[in-house]
Image (cartoon, rainbow, N blue to C red):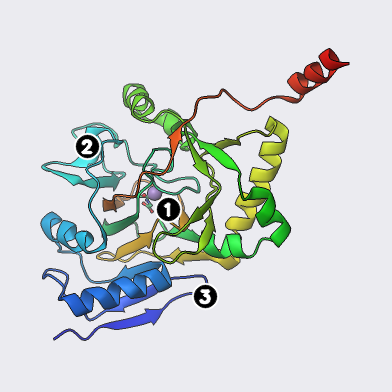
Amino acid sequence: MHDLQITPLGYAMGAEVTGLDLTKPLDDLTRRRVYDAWLKHVVLVFPGNAHLTPEQHIAFSRNFGELDTHESQAPETLLEGNREILVVSNKPRAGRPSQTRNTGRNWHTDLSYSLRPAKAAALLCKEKPAVGGDTMWANLTMAYETLSPKMQAIIADMEAVHDVTLVRGLNQRDPALVADMRRRNPPVVHPMVRVHPETGRKSLLAGERVSHILGLTEDESQALLGFLNQHATSPEFVFRHRWRVGDIVLWDNRCTCHVALPDFDQTQPRHMLRCSMKGEAEGRLAEAGPAATKEQMIQTVASLS
Ligand code: OGA
Ligand code: MN
């Protein structure tokens, strides 16, 4: 019998789940209780899983959805023999610098630069620096719900372009792999307001991988995005996790964004394994070019008068 305990960790979100043995399948009742706690607390921390095998990590993650086989990612970032596991690590691989050593360095929702943003992820900490290497999540449901009704109305029908080239630190990665990432992920359009398919609650889909809002000028777009991103990631909506080796953090990617902080000594290993749960097909390919500039608008007005 499991002795399941769920302890809230933060106001915005976050709860620790103890009393589970993740090397074994969860029974139906336990699975349901964990799943409901996840929908409620959004980010769950499961400590004590340092020795989980890749197969056990995968089996556990399947409780929360079908797993992504990472077509959007370069194959060399995946665990040998397990396409379901992405290696987020600063340890060299095959004698070369790791291509994921700076993964997640700006606020983002996983795979928002693709037509199928992830449903969820379960990230397991295998090795960590002595201090730091924290991750922060922002609750985008809270962010949406605390906008004024007027601002909610303004963004209600807005769509934004998400672009993989805005992943921070891409220029420090292997150019051939970056070109491959770009080929796999042309810019896509997503609505700025998402409806959570399970809770029905609205959330704000912004983040630092958004290039512009469709239909606005560049200046309008940057100003509004700046405000929305600052609002969404304000400390009141953030849960910050200090990793311990063996923690699995499971997050709901349908109503959060997150950032991996470089607040640690990069000569020390930080080694994480991630399973991603497949999201629903949501976006469409972006057809139009960049937003109109002020100069173009002036020209348009001039040619009309
Ligand atoms: C990720 C990610 C966070 C981290 O794996 O999606 O953003 O702290 N990583 O490593
Ligand atoms: Mn991420």
- Camera-side residue of 246 and 276: 276
| 285 sits to left or right of 57 | right
The residue type indicated by label 1 comes to Phe
Q: Residue at x 26, y 36 (%)?
A: 71
Find residue 297 and report its horizontal and vertical position in percent.
77, 23
Locate residue 122, reporting x and y percent.
29, 58
Secondary structure under the numbered disc 1 in the rendered image: loop
Residue that extends furthest to the right in the rendered view of this protein: 305
Q: Which mark is residue 235?
A: none
The number of numbered badges drawn on the structure is 3
How packed mark 1 is, by other alpha carbons closer than 10 Å (few <14, some 14-19, many 20 or more), is some
Among numbered discs 3 and 1, the one appearing first in the sequence: 3
**Inter-mark Cα distance, 3 to 2:** 39 Å
- Residue 38 in the image: state x and y as whole percent: 35, 70
Residue at label 1? Answer: 264
Mark closest to the chain's N terminus, 1 or 2? 2
Mark 3 Cα within 10 Å, few/some/many (few <14, many 20+)?
Answer: few
**Residue tagged by mark 3?**
11
The amino acid on which the numbered mark 3 sits, given as a three-letter code, is Tyr
Please rate how many residues cluster around mark 2, counting C-alpha atoms within 10 Å: few if below 14, some from 14 to 19, many from 20.
few
Q: Residue at x 33, y 28 (%)?
A: 184
In terms of secondary structure, where does tag 2 sit?
loop
